[in-house]
Amino acid sequence: MSFSRRLVLALGGGALATLVSPGRPWAGTVETVEMRGTARGERIWFEPRGLAVSSGTTIRFLNHDPGNSHTATAYHPSVLDRLRRIPKAAAPWDSDFLLPGQSFEVTLTAPGVYDFYCQPHEPMGMVGRIVVGTPETPGWEGPSADTTDIAADSLAVFPAVADILAKGRIGGA
Amino acid sequence: MRTALLLAAALFATASFAEDAATLEKSPPPAPYVQVSKALPLPEFIPGLGTLFVNPDTLPAGPFLAYDHDGKLSATIYMVPLEDLQGGKSFDGLAVGAPSVTSVDIYFNAGHAGVEKPHAHVVLFHDDGAKERLAK
Ligand SMILES: [Cu+2]
């Protein structure tokens, strides 16, 4: 951890805005979503599986699972021909396989609900949801209503948008 | 004549088995075994499983040969999809990397590159220290 980061932590979140914003008004926030798994791979998941961010936030998908590779892949026709579950205005992404310790970044600007999955582990419920902005943000697009291109088990893993907005982050295995 | 041929065949079989065991003992095992991490997006050393080699023709079950950090054969591993078992498929007469087995672990795995479907890992450890050497 850098000294300035320690300082910021010591001073608390309020100080962060004061310290960082004036000098770096263009810099977007980075939020990390980790790929996790139990030691023997009995269970795997995204941590958090629900996250609220503001427009322009960079999401860093980090494979924190020492024994397995994972992907973070947007539901979109242009990637593996899936039905779209991200805002129409958003660019789809696919991290491809990340080995332990590897990461992939995507910056989300279009406001709305983004659902993503891990290619090999989607059937085991390794999916997640990021909400950019709020329903009041102009151009905001709500969650996909589709239930035909996704397993009910996976669908059940997505937290409700209202819960994500209320809590900011939903996780815990 | 017939007896001699049978005897020769038996001797040959014994010799080749012994040779196999000896050549598998140290990494890398000979073809058709391939290093899993070179063919698939998986770490070179998987905690708990070590460095894996498999004959692709035997997928998904294996045997997977598991080597420790020093290249010593430490375990033979089978990966058995639950769906296959439930569907009535059996996996019989699978080869073993070494004749001595000191303990066996069996546990569930949700899937990984190479064996994507939920499956059981059946891990045959070949000596008392093997599990610890493969741990990390
Ligand atoms: Cu995964």
Image (spheres, rainbow, N blue to C red):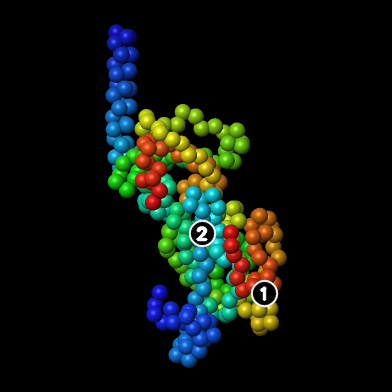
Identified by mark 2, the residue type is Arg
Q: Earlier in the sequence, mark 2 or mark 1?
A: 2
Identified by mark 1, the residue type is Ala
Q: In percent of the image, x 55 and y 75: which residue is there?
A: A108
Does any portion of residue B80 appear in the rendered image?
A: yes
B132 left or right of A54 in image: left
Q: Are marks 2 and 1 in contact (CB under 8 Å)?
A: no
Instruction: Decide if ligand 1 comes within 8 Å of the CB at mark 2.
Output: no
Expressed as whole percent of the image width and height from the top left, the position of residue A80 reads: 55, 59
Tell me the tag on residue A36. Answer: 2
* Chain ID of residue with mark 2: A
Along the line of sight, the residue nearer the viewer: B61 or A15:
A15
Q: Residue furthest front?
A: A10
Quarter placement of the N terminus of chain A: bottom left
Q: CA distance from mark 2 to mark 1?
A: 24 Å
Expressed as whole percent of the image width and height from the top left, the position of residue A58 reads: 51, 75
Q: Residue furthest bottom?
A: A22
Q: Is residue B14 above or below residue A37?
A: above
Q: Is residue A74 above or below residue B58?
A: below
Q: In percent of the image, x 64 and y 73: which residue is there?
A: A167
* Chain ID of residue with mark 1: A
A92 left or right of B41 in image: right
Q: Which residue is mark 1?
A: A166
Q: Secondary structure at mark 2?
A: strand
